[in-house]
Amino acid sequence: MKRTTALLIVPAIAVMLFSCSKKNIAVSTTVVTDTSFKQLPFPFGFAVNVSKLRTNIAYKNILLTQATSVSAETVMKIAYLHPAQNTYVWTDADYLVDFAVQNNIRVHGHTLVWHQSLPAWVTNFVGDSAAWENLLKTHIQTIVAHFKGKVTSWDVVNEAIENDGSGYRASSLWYQKLGIGFIARSFQYAHEADPNALLFYNDYGNEWGNTKRNAILNLVNDLKSKGVPINGIGLQMHTDYTQPDANIQTAISTAAATGLKVHISELDISMNPSNNQTLVFNSIIAQQQSDKFKMVAKAFNSIPKAQQYGITTWGIGDADTWITGFYSRPDWPLLFENNYQKKAAFFGVLNSVK
Ligand code: G3I
């Protein structure tokens, strides 16, 4: 009997995990219940806000009971980890990584090279191309080396394609200073620093249509064909309930056709894409959302097992989402309510594999 099947028919199993290290002896409790994402046949997790992990017990408990993978929502970005040229601030990222390692949760690093979240020392940096190359290499290798053996995988380059898929993102400082070769070289530098880390290219909009999707797929196929050490493709999948199923299925199946591992890396499903300021969440919306989450998880589960890197939602409860702030509207794009109670969509995901 498969482990997942066994878990499905056992109503509740509490597993005590004892982990020891030379430095400290930590006792952690992982609870697997009959309604846990830990039953899913692929890794499932969340982008984590470290201040909430530190202070909110309900938030932390969802991670302990539901997550088999985590990503850092902000604290591994360059502005946070590397705020000055010779200064690295590891505190929050280490806190997340130590929490995950102690609780047998995989850590996916997000993100090494992005056009956003740049600190002033980078935007103001003056130097020739060799100096910029050194900056890029040192940044990547210092961070990857710090987390070597603890962070399983990295979004090495994030969102290097234009929003509309028309080409490489011209406004990216990395592209402007280093040319398009910065992408391949970033993977090479990360690989040198941790040859065991799985390296991903991460972007959004594969489900929008051919233009953006083909631009992303052409990029990763080109990297692969040149022998660049790339292991996976991240489909952010910041989507909404009106996105046709066929588009989402195509995004997932074409990513799998590259032969790379596929990570649905930042999933959220907006229920208010038309920006209705008076919309109120109700049971009809809850069901529509559940159906869409279920469809996404089912499509993901249908690609070859070895390529199923996992699904990560971008936050845990609706109060955690970036969407309400970014679009200034009410929205409920995640799997848990503000107080971390399970929504209908939680069960949609769970039932997707039954
Ligand atoms: O923590 C500070 C707080 O102390 C301060 O008072 C406040 C004032 O603005 O800022 C807080 O930091 C904010 C941080 O989120 C907190 O979570 C930053 O300003 C804000 O820029 C940051 O936004 C994040 C954004 O990326 C930029 O890094 C969002 O949370 C995060 O959800 C978003 O995630 C991105 C992915 O990395 C890439 N794909 C798209 C996705 C959504 O934009």
Image (cartoon, grey):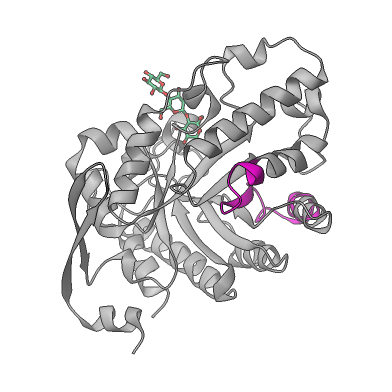
| Front residue (pair 318, 16) | 16
Does the magenta run of residues contain 206?
yes
Q: Residue at x 16, y 73 (%)?
A: 12
* Image-based side of 292 in relation to 205, left or right: left
Asked if residue 4 lies left or right of residue 258, the reply is left
Could you tell me residue 351's position as x and y percent? 36, 74
- Observer-nearest residue: 23 or 291? 23
Write down the region rendered in magenta: 190-218
Q: Residue at x 33, y 62 (%)?
A: 346
Residue at (36% x, 85% y) in the render: 2
Is 308 drawn above or below residue 333 in the view shown? below
* Residue 90 image point, x, y percent: 41, 28
* Left or right: 40 as drawn, with respect to 227: left
Whether residue 156 is visible to the viewer of this picture, yes or no, is yes
Q: Position of residue 38 (x, y in %)?
A: 32, 66
Q: Position of residue 328 (x, y in %)?
A: 45, 29
Residue 315 figure quarter: top left
- State yes or no: residue 139 in magenta: no
Q: Nearer the viewer, residue 71 or 254?
A: 71
Where on the picture, by quarter, is residue 6? Answer: bottom left
Picture quarter with the C terminus? bottom left
Query: Residue furthest toward the bottom?
Result: 1
